[in-house]
Amino acid sequence: MMHKDDVKKILLTEEQIQTRMKELGAQITKDYQGKNLLVIGLLKGAAWTVTDLTRYIDLPLRVEFMVASSYGNSTETSGSVKIHLDVHDDLRGKDVLLVDDIVDSGITFGAIVKILQQNHPNSVKTLAFCDKAERRVNGFECDYVGFKIPDEFVVGYGLDYAGDYRNLPFIGVLKSSVYAKAK
Ligand code: IMP
Ligand code: MG
């Protein structure tokens, strides 16, 4: 049974996360004045960021979600990105803000930004709740980052390990015994 007792260290508290979401929401409110904002979240992990963040954006906007996979149940990327659920909206004239829970290798964002650009949006920017910058393989840079974090596998606030722990309201690092059990 997954539980918060499986967490050995809290990296970001619920309060730190909510404070940062408010800051990002205020920044985006400034940056998107007069634009046609469409927030696109990558399910499932970005759902927590999208719902909190959009509450702090004081502008008319729309929300869509996409499903893409690269990881499966492992903690390492497989290198290719597959889209399972696409956006149905026409992107012409839209200012797209693509949101994910974390940017790691950069492969997911790199691939999806390319696909979105084929639909002729007015602009595409990216927001990652967490950024493991030192793990990047393609030089991808996000326009908005919640928190830069070290190269450690984290869970909570949408981030999962094999599907579990997404609902933790903080970001934590799991005890090594959790991985040992899974083998
Ligand atoms: P990228 O394509 O390597 O940038 O990986 C992005 C995806 O990897 C995220 O959407 C997560 O699903 C997954 N991921 C990367 N690091 C972590 C982590 O520390 N915890 C949970 N999921 C992670
Ligand atoms: Mg993901």
Image: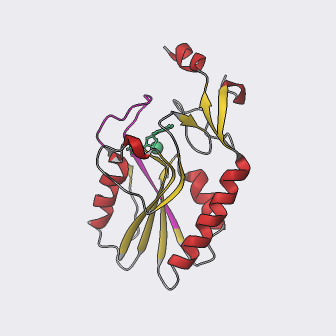
Q: Residue at x 45, y 29 (%)?
A: 73
Q: Residue 143's quadrant in the figure?
A: bottom left
Query: In the displayed image of the protein, which residue is found farthest to the left?
Result: 118
Q: Residue at x 34, y 55 (%)?
A: 112
Q: Nearer the viewer, residue 16 or 76?
A: 16
Q: Which x, y percent locates residue 151?
A: 47, 36
Q: Quadrant of the N terminus?
A: top right
Query: Horizontally, is 79 left or right of 87 in the view?
Result: left
Q: Nearer the viewer, residue 73 or 125?
A: 125
Magenta part of the protein: which range?
63-80
* Labels in figure, total: 0
Rendered image coloring scheme: secondary structure
Q: Which x, y percent locates residue 35?
A: 47, 82
| Res 91 seen here | no
Q: Residue 76's quadrant in the figure?
A: top left
Q: Residue at x 66, y 52 (%)?
A: 17
Is 165 covered by the magenta stretch?
no
Q: Which x, y percent locates residue 176?
A: 57, 19
Query: Horizontally, is 5 left or right of 72 in the view?
Result: right
- Say above or below: 151 vs 117: above
